[in-house]
Image: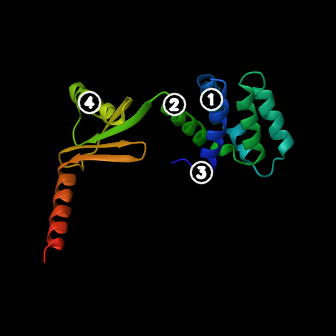
Amino acid sequence: MTSGVARNYARAIFELASEDSTIPAVEADLRAARDALYEDREARDFLASRIVGRAPKRRLILSAFEGKVDPRVLTLLLLVAERGRARLLGEIDDEFERLSRIARGVRRATVLSAFPLGDAEKGRIRSALEGRYGGSVELKAEIRPSLIGGVLCLSEGQEIEFTAEGQLKELRDRLRSTHANQP
């Protein structure tokens, strides 16, 4: 889950990239910077350290990224390092990627089932979700043995349940409300 602070940074740089239609380039540079910093544990720990001052952090970021990434990405890297938030870079990148997908009309969905789904089943589920959401859907399937029949779809914070357990709960709730409404 993305923190509110990381979400704010991601939205700010996304809006800037939207202004001049450079979202894909900024997304690639942000991802490359994140990967480079995450691969180098010493650099990551150095940037996260409260003991290290701003100037050495600034020098590290400039030496590693100046002229190699979009200037807005460089500014973001300097800002998060200066404010002691370099560890949020992964969350910032994830949120930027989510905003980019939404701008392209693509939704990510995870379908959970008790058993592996075949390609035809995944295709039908993808088509149903695309119809529901009115856009393209990137579908990922996972197995959850605890499900009792059916599938559970998770997408952008929404849950769509097509399981036997869900149908039984719905029936129970309807029976309770019907019973409660009778004199």
Q: Does 94 sit left or right of 150 as displayed? A: right
Q: Amino acid at mark 3?
A: Gly
- Residue type beneath disc 1: Ser
Locate residue 93: give its quadrant. top right
- Mark 2 and mark 1: Cα distance apart in space: 9 Å
Which quadrant would residue 134 be assigned to in this image?
top left
Q: Residue at x 48, y 33 (%)?
A: 102
Q: CA distance from mark 4 to mark 1?
A: 33 Å
Q: Which mark is residue 18?
A: 1
Q: Where in the figure is residue 117, as x and y percent of width and height?
A: 23, 32
**SS category of the residue bearing label 4:** helix
Q: Earlier in the sequence, mark 3 or mark 1?
A: 3
The residue carrying mark 4 is 122
Query: For mark 3, what is the residue?
Result: 4
Q: Earlier in the sequence, mark 4 or mark 1?
A: 1
* Amino acid at dot 4: Lys
Q: Earlier in the sequence, mark 2 or mark 1?
A: 1
Which mark is first along the chain, 4 or 2?
A: 2
The answer to whether mark 3 and mark 1 are in CB contact below 8 A is no
Kind of residue sitting beneath label 2: Ala
Q: Residue at x 35, y 33 (%)?
A: 140
Residue at (59, 45) in percent of width and height: 7
